[in-house]
Image: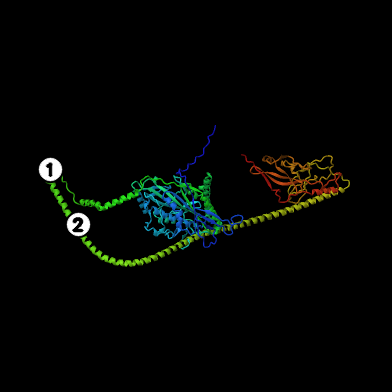
Amino acid sequence: MNRQVKGKTPRRPPPKKASSNQKDPVGVYCRVRPLGTEDKECCIEVISSSTIQLHAPEGFKVNRNGEYKEMQYSFKKVFGVSVSQMDLFEHVARPLVDDLVHGKNGLLFTYGVTGSGKTFTMTGSPGLGGLLPRSLDMIFNSIGPYQAKRYVFKTDDKNGLDVQSEVDALLERQRRENNMPAPKSSSSRQKLDPEIADMIRPEEACKADGVDEDSCFGVFVSYIEIYNNYIYDLLEENQEDVIKPKWNGGGTPSRQNTEFIPPQSKILREDQNHNMYVAGCMEVEVKSPEEAFQVFWRGQKKRKVANTRLNRESSRSHSVFIIKLAQAPLDADGDTILQDKNQVTLSQLCLVDLAGSERTGRTQAEGTRIREAGNINQSLLTLRTCIEILRENQMCGTNRMVPYRDSKVTHLFKNYFDGEGKVKMVVCVNPKADDYEETLLVMRFAEMTQEVEVARPVDRPICGFTPGRRHRNQAFKDELTRMLEERGGPLDADLPSVMNHLVQSLPPLPSSELTDPHDDITLPRLIEALQNRHRIRQMMVGEFNKAADIMKSMLQELDSNLLSKDDFIHQQNGKLSEMDKIIQVNKAEIERLEKRNKMQDHKIDILQKTTKIYEDDKRSLQQELETREQRLMREQSDKRRMEQRMHGVVSDTQHKWEKECERRVNAMHVEMQNKLWVKDEKLKQLKAIVTESKTPGRPDPPPRQTPTQPRPQLQPPSQPRPQPLSQPRPQPQSQPRPQRSSREERLPAKRSASPSPIPTATPVRPLHRRSRSAGGEKWVDHKPTSNLDLGTVLQPVIPNSIQVSAPSEKALSKCDRYVLTHQEVASDGEIQTKLIKGEVIKTRGGGQSVQFTDIETLKQELASAPSRKRRSSEGVPTNADRMDVENRCSVAMEMRAGSNMGPGVEHHGFTKRRK
């Protein structure tokens, strides 16, 4: 049975775009900043209007052979140090603004090293407006007469716009004006910040051609920054600029500040047309270039800047100022905006001021500045990577995926590189020699960017109405007004209402229906009512005439007063002319003082910003100092605790070693007494042997004892001496055996058995002690499989034992004693065998533990030593032989006091856990 193969999830089809085979390369312009006063060496030279040349500074070798290498780079346009802001705008930004008015998108960003003039190029300074204020001025100069009323266009928070009627827009204006804390002043120019006032001179104003007069326009602006790869809205009302300290009554800042709420980062989303936008970003509708630039400057003050070694106000984030232009056609009559959302054309222009790339080695940044520089360089690296892959795909025909999502900058503007609008870049460079290496990287990236082509955007569709309808509707209204004025205008229209009011003030007429020719009631009643109305009319006419006379007298009095006042006014006009001259002089003085005040305010603001930066640095340094002080205090407390602990450990160790030394001294004392006692015993035995050998007529000594009956070792009575398990192997009958006394202990050739007792009292002769192996004890004989059979005379013989290769719980539970056979190579190269003996003790947990009590060492020695060689020709040992035997009996392996294998060391055998 064939298993059905699970298919992959189909990818979402790409958005359908209008087919446009025409492509335009990315426009890259270069602007050279003037050399500073402190800089002496220049490494950039403008050769022509489109080419610059880079010279390596002194002490910098470009190629390996040590020669200076001059490199040239070409751009669409090169602007030297003497170029004006107006000329730069005419070549770079004006075409993008013209496309914006005609419904096309545009992207313009400045790129370069820190301190190369990017912010000045984009924003400018008082009297020298940059690309952004000039673009706003051109937009409003072009669409000023055709702007819709405020709140007719309304954002839908999904990168789209809704169209409201004029009534709904009026209600929205009233509601928002009521919610505002204070009414807006009509003179918005007077409220402008001194830093942004008079950015553009009136003679430099420009406007776009071919603006659609049959449409209404609305302008929305938004301002965001990308800081540490997070997007923040600079126009949020509740966003704080920096953490400002609160002030107490004493005039000193307090550190407890819990009111600051960090701004929330925004996320990028994709609208229904597959265009990227910042979700939740505030979009402000503006109606003049002053209002738009005031909104920009409000956000510019919240932008994150820092004082570095290369720039006093270095931008630490990428700023993006987005201008959205909504365009909706008028209806067929040319009177109101067409209430159709699908007919609204939305175009936008993004002005991006990228943060400058920098090296921490030059800026000597630390802490937060290093992290900011790393994020800035990473985002710029992602931008370069995307440009490289786009260039490779276009030139080599590959289809590699462009990593737009690796950075917020590239992810936000991916639609522009896919053909949603024109892309232009202004590369700002600083000609000083210190920036030479980084300028080389900027030049290579700019040269590569010029080779990327972007699809040309298509023109917007036409709504289908007859052009010129706004002009015809205005002409119709003007003609209607003229005709009304010729016919009396609004007075004819108000006359019927006045007559109706007068008629309604008269008493009503009675019923005048005649049903009988002899009716004498209806006609007299009607006559009486008419007479009454006539009387009322006469009274009203009299009152009217009286009021007219009063009015005429008042007018005559006013005329006389006016004549006198005319004379007075003539006199006052003479005085006013004199005052006007004085006012003109004062105005000139006031303008001079205002300009001076403006410059002083600008300097004061710069000093305040610098002070604020220094205060931030001071606050951060104080926090770091407090942190280090706390860390030092913790380390000191840890050090004191460690010293106390080490003092305790030293005292414990000292006490322990005192006890150990005392124990070792006692053990050594006992050992020396034991050795002395053994020597005394040997001397006594030797004396007895010599005495017996000199006794005449003494019979021969008894035969040698069998291996199963060894002579017990001498041992102090305080602790029973363990029985040695090493016994001689039976010799062949052909070899003669020497006879010895029953008190002697036979020792095998080439081996020595030496149990290691630790006596604790005066030693006695253990002649009457019975061996512990003679009882009913059962042994566990543990012989590892790696042991070798040496075939020597002395071999361990363990009766009533269980031989195992590895100890087990079952074997230990059946036995009382334990012996382990261990072999190792001695220092002289011979094999040394140790018999480690112990007692099996039952534990409380149901298992067994082994307590080692003795070690018996069997050491193999060479047989070539002349002093140890036995004479086989003599059947009876001589006195010399007996002395040799005694000397050989004195060779033993004693266990030192405090050995790890001495008494007290336990080996536990635990019960195996059953699964």
The amino acid type found where label 2 is placed reads Phe
| Residue 516 - label | 1
Residue at image x 80%, y 48%?
889
Q: Residues within 10 Å of mark 2 (few under 14, many from 20)?
A: few
Is 783 placed left or right of 310 in the picture?
A: right
Query: What residue is pinned by disc 2?
Result: 544
Q: Give the x, y percent position of residue 188.
A: 39, 58
Q: Give the x, y percent position of residue 635.
A: 58, 57
The N terminus, quarter of image? top right
Q: Secondary structure at mark 1?
A: loop
Q: Quadrant of residue 625?
A: bottom right
The amino acid type found where label 1 is placed reads Asp
Out of 516 and 458, give the one closest to the viewer.
458
Q: Give the x, y percent position of residue 351.
A: 46, 53
Out of 363 and 108, give the one closest to the viewer.
108
Out of 259 and 486, give the one closest to the viewer.
486
Q: Is residue 839 above or below residue 563?
A: above
Out of 620 and 811, give the one closest to the viewer.
620
Q: Give the x, y percent position of residue 322.
A: 44, 52
Q: How many numbered callouts?
A: 2
Q: Which residue reaches farthest top?
A: 1
The C terminus, quarter of image? top right
Is 783 placed left or right of 395 in the picture?
A: right
Q: Which residue reaches farthest left?
A: 518
